[in-house]
Amino acid sequence: MFPLSIVKQLKKLIMSTESPLSTSTAFCARCGSILPLLQEFGSVKCYTCKAHYEADNYSNLKFQYTIHFNTISVITNENILHTDGPEGPVVERKCAKCGYDRMSYATLQLRSADEGQTVFYTCIKCKYKETENS
């Protein structure tokens, strides 16, 4: 079907580590698999197609990274205690202390997984807290 010389050239291209694909040093040029990290001594060997890459291929690599820091917001106990809004979702539930009919809640799994969760209710008006094991 193809002349023998073309078949030989194709085999030579496939068997070499060179490829017409433009890849970075992180990927195998022959099969496209991700390459393992370069160790202190030796070369890099592709796990998939067993192609070898000498350490010299990695000598000119430069790594650049940027660390972005979030702004610091000062949180004090005073700020936490004097919040005006609800501390979570709000449900219709009567406060045992002041009688207000709306409370916010939060849930936690404090007991074993086959038991229910613990619901913490907080009165929106007086900040009274109560718990319920559901």
Image: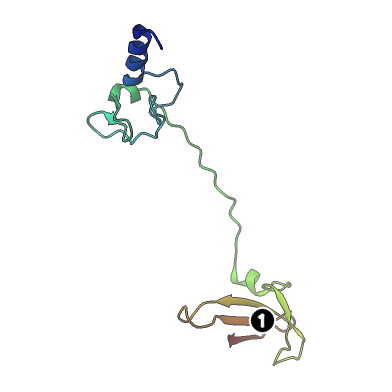
Please tell me which residue lies in front, 12 or 21. 12
| Residue located farthest toward the left when viewing the structure as drawn | 41
Q: Is residue 81 above or below residue 12?
A: below
Q: Is residue 4 visible?
A: yes
**From the image, which quarter does the C terminus lie in?**
bottom right
**Other-residue count near label 1 (Cα within 10 Å), few / some / many at <14 / 14–19 / ≥20:** many
**From the image, which quarter does the N terminus lie in?**
top left
Q: Residue at x 60, y 51 (%)?
A: 71
Position of residue 67 in the picture relative to residue 40 (left or right): right
Q: Which residue is mark 1?
A: 122
Q: Residue at x 39, y 27 (%)?
A: 25
Q: Quadrant of residue 118?
A: bottom right
Q: Is residue 17 visible?
A: no
Please tell me which residue lies in front, 85 or 7. 7
Q: Residue at x 38, y 7 (%)?
A: 3
Q: Residue at x 43, y 31 (%)?
A: 63
Q: Position of residue 103 (x, y in %)?
A: 71, 81
Q: Is residue 27 above or below residue 6?
A: below
Kind of residue at badge 1: Thr
Please tell me which residue lies in front, 100 or 53. 53
Q: Position of residue 33 (x, y in %)?
A: 39, 33
Position of residue 63 in the picture relative to residue 106 (left or right): left
Element type at mark 1: strand
| Residue located farthest toward the front when viewing the structure as drawn | 1
